[in-house]
Image (tube, helix red, strand yellow):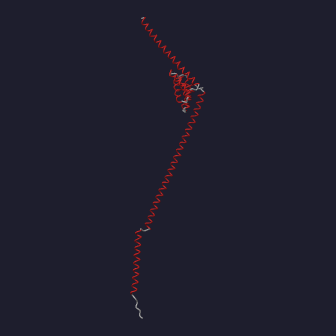
Amino acid sequence: MFRHITILSKMAAKLLLICALLSLALTMGAQSDKKYIREGNKEFEKSNYLESEVSYRKALDQNVKSPDAVFNVGDALYKQKKYEDAGKQFIENINMNEDKNKKSAGLYNLGNALLNAKKLQESIDAYKGSLKLKPNNKEAKYNLAYAQDQLIKQQEQQKQQQQQQNQDKNKDKNKEDKNKDQKDQKDQKDQQKDQNANQDQKQQQQQKQEQGISKEDAQRLLNALANDEKNVQEKVKLAKASKEKVRTVKNW
């Protein structure tokens, strides 16, 4: 019985040692991530935003569940104008945080990142979420009003652009229709001109056929006239010859 208790005591001692080591490791890890966060904060204050991001990410390597490190990475990215990447960090921070004030801060920063990324409706939703958790946040109220104003201007501009595009399309269509009508009219005129030319040509040919004679017919006509003239001359000669032969007998 005593031996059995001794064995249990040794096992309990081992368990206690393991727990102590785990606790020490967690404590050291927590201290390490806080150390890197402090280093990142120093760089951030010096406007060395890339260096601060590196330190914050080292803190995350030590403790992936550190909402502060996630939030600070988002801040460092935001200062580097990497707004979409910053927004992803803020969303992750919001999901990790249960504290109302920290959640509200995460939504406010998310709204700023989305606003700079020109995602106006999404930024408006983020600001509203932040104000729902912390209604007295004046910066969130101001930025919400600004984002709403920008959204209205954007919608009006898009509407004007759409109207202009429609007008341009109508102008192009009217111009195209006008050119088509002019082309059709020209084609009709050319066609009518060709028809008139063909008709004139046919009329001229018909007039020549009606009024004129062919070369062969003209030659035959000349030959006929020549033959007639020859016959007349022969008749005249015969008449003269007859008069010379018949003489009148006179009584002296």
Q: Give x and y (percent) for residue 99.
A: 55, 22
- Depth check: give the residue in front, 184 or 249: 249
Q: Nearer the viewer, residue 192 or 45?
A: 45
Q: Quadrant of residue 162?
A: top right
Q: Position of residue 137 (x, y in %)?
A: 59, 26
| Residue 107 drawn at (x, y percent) | 55, 27
Query: Taking 202 as reference, is 44 above or below it?
Result: above
Residue 102: where, in percent of width, then height? Answer: 56, 23
Q: Is residue 228 above or below residue 180?
A: below
Residue extending farthest top: 2
Quadrant placement of the C terminus: bottom left
* Left-right relation of 203 to 49: left
Disc count in the image? 0
Question: Which residue is farthest bottom?
Answer: 252
The N terminus, quarter of image: top left
Q: Nearer the viewer, residue 167 or 136?
A: 167
